[in-house]
Amino acid sequence: MTTEESILNKIQILITNHFQTPEMAFNFFDEDNDQKLTKAETVKLLKDAEISGFIRGIVSSKLIEGYDKNGDELIDWEEFKTAISKIKKSDS
């Protein structure tokens, strides 16, 4: 399992164990209710997913870089769904 797969797996475990749906997880971490996850909100998600504090900032930046399709340096719901679908595909 690559590091990316390991991180995505931990995010999936967090979402599955603590939220009824991915949308509920997204809304929980979207603290300012602007329908976008900032870097700080993404770091909180990673912290709750038990990603090491040492790499959390780097991972957050890479997630945003990898999934932010409109270039606003935020993760909106559609981009979050794309990340979630990648998690589900890596399970199969």
Image (tube, helix red, strand yellow):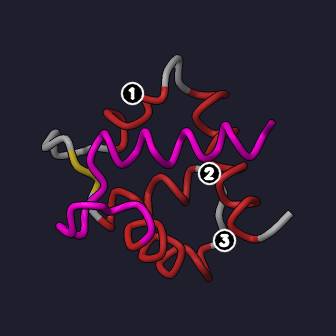
Circle 3 crowding by C-alpha within 10 Å: few under 14, some 14–19, many from 20: few
Residue 55 occupies quadrant? bottom right
Which mark sits nearer the N-terminus, 1 or 2? 1
Camera-nearest residue between 56 and 9: 9
Q: CA distance from mark 2 to mark 3?
A: 9 Å
Amino acid type of the residue tagged 2 in the rendering:
Ala
Q: Which residues are magenta?
A: 66-92
**Is 14 situated left or right of 69 in this image?**
right
Look at the picture and state if 9 lies above or below 39. Answer: above
Q: Nearer the viewer, residue 34 or 77?
A: 77
Q: Which residue is mark 1?
A: 23
Q: Is residue 51 magenta?
A: no
For the image shown, how many numbered marks are present on the structure? 3
Evaluate if marks 2 and 3 touch, with contact meaning CB atoms under 8 Å apart.
no
Determine the residue positioned at 53% across, 73% down.
Answer: 59
Q: What x and y, as percent, mark residue 35?
A: 19, 41
Residue receiving disc 2: 49
**Residue drawn at x 80%, y 69% as measured from the top left:** 2
Q: Which mark is residue 52?
A: 3
